[in-house]
Every structure is written in structure tokens, then in C-alpha cells.
């Protein structure tokens, strides 16, 4: 950023979508500033599990390509898991049929349908896969460092509106382009009445020796069952409660999560609880919105929001598409 305070792009939102988008723009030579209401480690992204998998996300015609673009990035980042927070870990998607997935599934090496006797728990079908599992606090820190290494600046503070962001995200800063990666806050800032919260609650426990992940997620149910082994903890989930914006963990919900996970791995029932987390997934009617519009003063506003519970899964693919709109290609 020049000493005159002028930047090329202000990205509003410091979660995984905002940071990956900012990286793509900064690494193409643009002067970029990220403006985030919350600290990077305090965003919804920091609460995520986070397993790569296109889950509860639309539009179907775009999601496959976005997801695969992100998968290729995570496969590269997994070469240095201590720094990036990304590891390739084996696991099982229960209650899932390969034939029911999109064409993107054919691009995942080693993805296979399991025989009924291979599926854990009370499930008749399932898939085996080795997929990126991301330790989000570590990964968000790595994303911020990569962005700053490319000359970017992160600042914390709320914006009153998206046009205000470009006119003065901070004293003396002007930018001709604003990128909206505000997640659920887009409901008020755009405003977009199609945005809705989908509440996810997690339980963190001491890992009793689980080294594979497991999911059983019925898209029509508010209850899901999954566990993800992360360094220093095992993450148990979960919920998908549409329209529920309670930020505090619910004790009965937590107990039910532990019980569901213990049906798959009984030793989980005895694991010491380390903590609880709640995140509000930013879902949107019609799915992800990536779109550019010209502002009355001639500036450019590019939207990249509405990723629901799959922001990590599509982050890099959506960042690439957003960068194309910013650069006019």
C-alpha cells in the first residue's frame, strides 16, 4: 500500500473466504486491505471442523468446479501441515452413495463405495476417502501471514455499509473496488433477505485415540454425527439448525452430540470435555453469490458470500472467480 493511503481493493470480511480472496488479489499485484469486524481467529471460520467436502451448498452447477479447485490447493498445502494446518486424513462418509454425488466425485483419488460390513455404526452404506482436514485456527493464521507477505494489510473494525468501506475503511483510505465477503452480515449490509443462519454446535474432547474422521450428515435433518481428529483435540458434532441464532452452547445438545459419536466409537463417551463451540453458518437462498455491480459513484462492488457450511471447501475456487470479476477477465 502506498504512503498516500490509496489501495486498489478493500475486502470486507476476514474469514476463510475473505482471506483467500485477498490473497489471490494481492498475489496478482493489487494493493489490498482486509477489513474485518472480528479478529481473524474470532470469525465463524475459526469454529469450523473443517473437512473438505461439498456439503449443503449451492448452486450445484458451480460447486463442483469451485470445490475441486480448492481441493488441489489443500493437497499442496498438506505437504507442510505444521505450518498450514492442512492434513490429508482417511475417513468414512456414512449414509452416502457414490452414485448420488456430482461428477466432481470422479476427480477424488481413492474415493470408493464401502461394503455394508465396512461401514461403522448403524449404517448400511458409506464411502471411504482420504481428504483434507483443516485445523482452522492454524490455517487462518497461515492465510493471514501469506496475505501480509504479499503486501496486504488486515485491520479490525466494523463497516456501516459496503460503499462506505471503499470510501473510508480507515482514515485516509480510498479504494475503487470493494469485495463483500461478509458472510451472515451480508443480510444487513447488502441487504440480502435470503441470508439465514444455520447454527452449528461442537464439542471438543481429549482424543482417546481416534485417528480417522467420520461423518453421517442427513441434509434434511438438524442433527448430524461427525468427529474430526485435530492436533490436541477431537472435534465432535454436530447440528444444522436453520434460523437458530443462539450463540451460547446448549448442554442438552452437547450431551446428544457426544452420545451420537459414541455409538460409532464407544471410547468417546469417556473422553474429557475440553470445551464447546457454536458457529452460525452463512447460508443463502439460491446458494453462493459471486457477482459484480457498479456503484453509483463509478466504483465496483463484487460479492462473494452465502457459502453456508462449505466455505472452506469452495474458498479457493470462489476466490479465483471473484478475482476474475475484480480484474475484469
Image: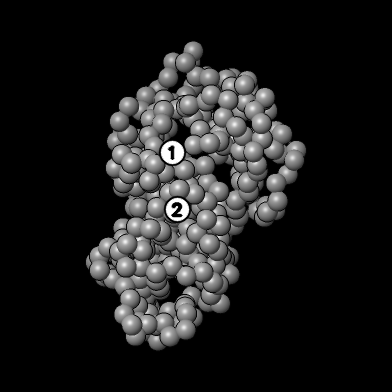
Q: Residue at position x 47%, y 43% from top?
A: 135
Determine whether the residue tagged by mark 2 lies in a helix, strand or loop: helix
Q: Position of residue 239 (x, y in %)?
A: 62, 41
Between 44 and 157, the residue placed more toward the observer is 157
Q: Residue at position x 37%, y 40% from top?
A: 81
Q: Position of residue 196 (x, y in %)?
A: 59, 57
Q: Are marks 1 and 2 in contact (CB under 8 Å)?
A: no
On screen, residue 245 versus residue 55, left or right, reads right
Q: Quadrant of the N terminus?
A: bottom left
Between 233 and 22, the residue placed more toward the observer is 233
Does any portion of residue 288 appear in the rendered image? no
Label 1 CA crowd tier, 10 Å (few <14, some 14–19, many 20+): many
Determine whether the residue tagged by mark 1 lies in a helix, strand or loop: strand
The disc at residue 281 is none
Q: Quadrant of residue 289?
A: bottom left
Q: Position of residue 48 (x, y in %)?
A: 52, 46
Q: Position of residue 282 (x, y in %)?
A: 54, 56
Say which label, 1 or 2, has the lower sequence index.
Answer: 1
Q: Quadrant of residue 299?
A: bottom left
Color encoding of the figure: one colour
Judging by the rendered image, the residue that carries numbered circle 1 is 133
Q: Is residue 76 above or below residue 10?
A: above
Q: Residue at position x 39%, y 55% from top?
A: 143
Between 252 and 144, the residue placed more toward the observer is 144
Spatial CA span between label 1 and label 2: 13 Å
Judging by the rendered image, the residue that carries numbered circle 2 is 140
Q: Is residue 156 above or below residue 222?
A: below
Q: Residue at position x 35%, y 53% from top?
A: 316
Does any portion of residue 87 appear in the rendered image? yes
Label 2 CA crowd tier, 10 Å (few <14, some 14–19, many 20+): many
Amino acid at each position: 500500500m502506498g504512503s498516500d493511503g490509496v489501495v486498489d481493493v478493500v475486502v470486507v470480511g476476514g474469514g476463510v473466504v475473505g482471506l483467500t480472496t485477498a490473497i489471490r488479489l494481492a498475489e496478482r499485484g493489487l494493493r489490498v486491505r482486509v477489513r474485518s469486524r472480528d479478529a481473524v481467529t474470532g470469525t465463524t471460520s475459526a469454529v469450523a471442523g473443517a473437512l473438505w467436502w461439498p456439503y449443503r451448498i449451492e448452486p450445484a452447477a458451480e460447486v463442483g468446479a469451485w470445490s475441486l479447485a480448492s481441493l488441489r490447493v489443500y493437497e499442496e498445502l498438506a505437504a507442510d501441515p505444521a505450518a498450514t494446518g492442512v492434513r490429508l486424513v482417511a475417513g468414512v462418509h456414512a449414509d452416502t452413495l457414490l452414485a448420488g454425488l456430482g461428477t466432481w466425485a470422479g476427480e477424488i483419488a481413492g474415493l470408493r463405495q464401502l461394503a455394508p460390513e465396512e461401514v461403522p455404526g448403524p449404517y448400511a452404506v458409506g464411502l471411504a476417502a482420504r481428504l483434507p482436514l483443516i485445523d482452522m485456527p492454524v490455517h487462518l493464521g497461515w492465510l493471514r501471514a501469506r496475505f501480509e507477505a504479499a503486501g496486504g494489510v488486515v485491520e479490525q473494525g466494523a463497516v456501516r455499509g459496503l460503499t462506505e468501506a471503499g470510501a473510508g475503511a480507515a482514515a485516509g483510505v480510498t479504494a475503487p473496488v470493494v469485495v463483500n465477503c461478509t458472510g451472515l452480515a451480508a443480510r444487513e449490509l447488502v441487504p440480502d433477505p435470503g441470508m439465514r443462519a444455520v447454527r452449528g454446535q461442537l464439542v471438543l474432547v481429549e482424543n482417546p485415540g481416534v485417528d480417522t474422521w467420520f461423518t453421517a450428515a442427513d441434509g434434511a435433518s438438524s442433527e448430524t454425527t461427525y468427529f474430526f481428529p485435530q492436533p490436541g483435540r477431537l472435534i465432535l458434532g454436530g447440528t444444522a439448525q436453520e434460523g437458530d441464532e443462539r450463540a451460547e452452547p446448549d448442554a442438552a445438545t452437547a450431551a446428544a452430540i457426544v452420545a451420537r459419536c459414541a455409538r460409532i466409537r464407544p471410547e468417546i463417551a469417556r473422553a474429557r470435555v475440553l470445551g464447546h463451540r457454536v458457529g452460525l453458518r452463512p447460508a443463502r437462498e439460491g446458494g453462493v453469490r459471486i457477482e459484480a455491480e457498479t456503484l453509483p459513484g463509478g466504483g465496483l462492488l463484487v460479492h462473494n458470500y452465502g457459502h453456508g457450511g462449505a466455505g472452506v471447501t469452495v474458498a479457493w475456487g470462489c476466490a479465483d472467480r471473484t478475482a476474475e470479476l475484480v480484474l475484469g477477465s
